[in-house]
Amino acid sequence: MESILTNRRRIAGRNVFRLRMEHLEPRRLLAAMTQSGLSLEDMRDEISGQFSSATIITHGFQLDGAGDSLIPLADAIVERNGGLLVDFDVNTDGGPGTFDLFESVSKTGSELVLLFDWGDASNNDSAGWGEAAGDALFSIAVGLGIIAPAAGPANTTDLHFIGHSFGTAVTSEAVERLAAFEIPVDHLTYLDPHDFDQSRLPIDGSQDLDTLGLPRINESPVYGATVWDNVDFADVYYQTNPLGFFSTNPGGRPIPGAYNASVTAETSEASFPHSAVWNEYYLASINDPSSTTGYAFSSRIDNAVDRPEPRFYGSDQDHDHTPDAIVNRDNGMPNSTGLDANGLTSAQITAGRWAPAWNPQINNAGFAFVGNRSSEVPGWAFHSGGGNAEITPNPDAALSLQSSNDSRTHNWTYIPNDIALLDYDITIPISTTGGSLQVLIGDTLVDSLAIDQYTSLERTLAANGGLTLSSSIGSHADSVNTLTFRLTNSPSDNANITVDEVRFAHEITSPIRPRIIVPAAVATEHFIASVSDSDLTGTAIIFEALSDATITATTTNATPFGRSLHIVDADQKSVGSRQGNSVFAEVQSGETYAIVSQALTTDQTITLQSTGGDTSLTHLAPTNIFEPTDTNANGETTAVDALRVINELNARSNGNDDPNRTTEPFLDVDGGGFISELDALRVINYLNARGHATSEPIEPEPPTDFLATPVPFTPIQTQTNAATPPTTQPYIDPVETELISRPLNATPPPLASTGRPASHLQTATPKESRLEGEADSNEDLTSPLASSEYSLEPTLQPRVNSRTLRR
C-alpha cells in the first residue's frame, strides 16, 4: 500500500493531480488511443458494428479521480482477443463524463472492453452509491449500444461482466437490470467480492452494499453480489488473509450460485492481497494462454477450459464472512437448521440464480439517499447528473427549488419502451407566486408549468400534501437520457417548491372492455378483485353526479408504475388531479363519470368520497359509457340488452309507471337524455351488423324536439323455446339474487337491501334457468344486472314520475 501522485487522468481538457492509494502496477498501455473526450452519443456512433462480444469491468473502492485502477486488466483482455477498449471517466468537476477509445495494435478482433469509473462515488461515507453506480453502468451499456433492453432475450452480444471488491455489488446491480429485461449474460466474474461490512474497515458499513442482493437471511439482506437467473456461468476468486495489526486488507467471500475458488494461499505473500486477486492471480490467467483457471473459462478464447459446476460448500472454502445461518464455518458444510429456518436448501444456495427484484424505475427517485456533501446525491451526481439544487433533510427528503435557475439533473437513465409519462410530486406553498417549473429530458424541454396557471384545486393539493403531475416522455422512450428539473422566472429567492418521487408511468387510456361493477352505493369503500381475464383492461364503476362536488378516489394498491386509478367523464377523457394514490376531480350535477382501476394481479380496495355527501353520487347512470349497447354491463351485447329497454318502455306504457319505481341504469343507449324506442333499435342494429357484416343497419337520429312517448312493444323473446309465452319481463330481486319471470303488468316488489356493505359484486353461481325460454349457454348469465349478488337500493329519494333521464 503506497501513496503516489499521478497525472494520467485528463479531466475537462486539463491535467490535474490526484492523490490515490493503491497497489503499484504497470501503467503502460499496449492499446493505442484513437479518440478522446467523446460524449456517450459520439462513442456509440464510433463503435457501432465493430464488436460481437463485450467485457464490462468495474473497480472497487478508490479515491476521487482514480477510476482507471483496473485498466491493466482491460488492456490485457483487449490484447488477448483483439478489439476496442472504451474507457469512461467521471468528470470530477461536475457535468457529463467522457469516453476515450483505444484500439488493439497487436491483434484484430471483435471484442469490446468497457472500463467503468465510479471512483468519486465509491469512497462516499453514505449509502445508495452502489445501486446508483450499477444503474448508471446499465444505462451506459444501453447508451453505447452494447445491449438493447427492448429486444430482451434476442440480444446477441456475448457478455462478460467483471467486478472487483465494492465493484462486485455495482456489477450485480447492472446484471440484475439485464435480468429484469431477460437479457442473457454468458459470464459473470466476481474478484474478491467485498459486499459486506468488515470490522475495522471504514466505509463498509455506511455504503450498505449488503442490502442490495439475494438471498435474504432471517428476512434481512446479507449479500450485495448476486448470481441472477440470466447468468450462464459465474466464477468467484476470493481471499481471506488477515487484516494484520496496521494494514487494512479487505477480505472476500464465496457467493451463492457461483463456482467459488479460494486464492488465500496464492495471495498471502502479496503486499496487498485484496488487490492481488485481480492484479496478480486473475491478470496472470489472462496473459498466460496455458492457464487452466480464471480467464481460461472465458468463451472468447480458443481452447477454453470446460466450465465447472457451481461450488459453494466444502472444506476447501473459507467462509469467514458468510452468514452462519447457511454454513457451518468450522467445516464449510451446510447449516441445515439455519437453512430450514429460512426456507432454503443447500442445493438452492449452491445453484443460486435468483430472480430479479428490480423494476425499471428511476434510481433514488425519492431522494432517500444523500452523500457526504449536499451536492452529492446518489443517482443525481457523477454520471452526467448534478446541479445546484439541494435536498431537504429527512424524513421528508425532496429536491428543493428556491430561486430562478435552481436545478438538479438525474444521471443517465434508460427509459423503457413502454413508458409514456414522467410522474412526480410537487409541493408549492400558497404564498408562492410566479415562476415556472421546467422538465427536461436530455436537452429537450418537455414541460414548462407556470405556477400561476394551476387551478384552485391543484394549488390546494400542492400546498397540502403535494400534487402529482405528469410530463410526456414523447419520443424519448427506449432511450438513455438525463432528467432535469429546474425553476425559472421566479420573482423570489424563497419559492420553497419541492419535487419528490420522480417515476416512470404508463399512459392511462380509456379502457376498451373494463369489467363493470354496479354497487348499491357509490361514495363508499369498494373491494376490487384481481382480474385474471387478459382481455379485460381494468374495472370501472359508472355513476352520475346528483350535485356539484369534489370527489376523491383512493386505492390501497398500485402498479410498479403507479397511476392504477383515474376518473373519466362521459367522453372517457381523464379528469381530475392526483396526489399519490388518490385522484381528485370536480364533478357537475347531472353528468356521468366513471372510476377506472387498471387491471391488477392483486386485490385492492378503492374508497370514494364526495364533498356533497354519500348520496350525491348514484349508480343509476343513464348510459354505459364504455359500451352503450351493453345495457346489463356484462361485457357483451346480446338480445337481452334490447329486451331490457323494451321491457322498461312496456312497463311505462302499460300503466305501471309507479312513481316510486326506480329506472335501472344504462338504458339510455344513445345518450339522448331519455329512454325511447331508438335505444332498443340501437341495440338491435348493432346485433344485426355483427351477425350480417354486409348489411348497413340504419342508425336513425331522434329529432331535436323528440319527446319520449313510449309505444307499446312486444318484448323480444329468445328462440330457444317456442312455447315460452311472450309475456315476461326480467327484474332483479336483490334478496333472492336470481332473475324471475313475472307478468308484464305486475308491479315489481320494492327494492330491498341485502344487508351487505357496498363492495365489489360477488358473482352468484348461475342457476339452471335464469330467463324462462332461454338456453343455459345464454351469454347474459354473467351479467351483474342479471345474476350477481348486489343491491339496487337507491341511495337517495327516487325521482317522482321519472319518464326521462336528464344528463
Image (cartoon, rainbow, N blue to C red):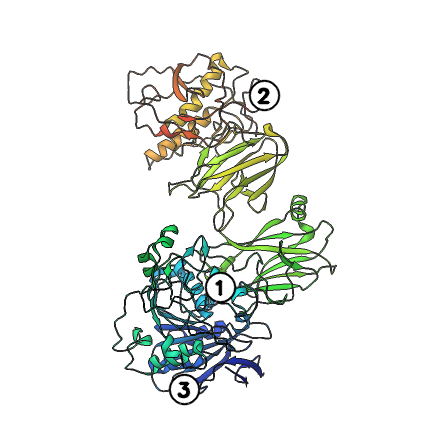
Residue denoted by label 1 = 209
Horizontal relation, residue 93 to residue 785: left or right = right
* Residue in front for this viewpoint, 22 or 523: 22
Residue 617 in the image: above or below residue 402 = above
Q: Earlier in the sequence, mark 3 or mark 1?
A: 3
Q: Residues within 10 Å of mark 1 (few under 14, many from 20)?
A: many
Residue denoted by label 2 = 797
Q: Is residue 182 visible?
A: no
For residue 30, the mark is 3
Name the quadrant containing residue 779: top left
Secondary structure beneath label 1: helix
Q: Residues within 10 Å of mark 3 (few under 14, many from 20)?
A: some
As shown in the figure, which amino acid type bears the numbered disc 3?
Leu
* Residue in front for this viewpoint, 349 or 153: 349
Secondary structure beneath label 3: loop
| Mark in the foreground, 2 or 1 | 1
Residue in the image at 27% along x and 75% along y: 304
Query: Residue 215: where, in percent of width, then height?
Result: 40, 57
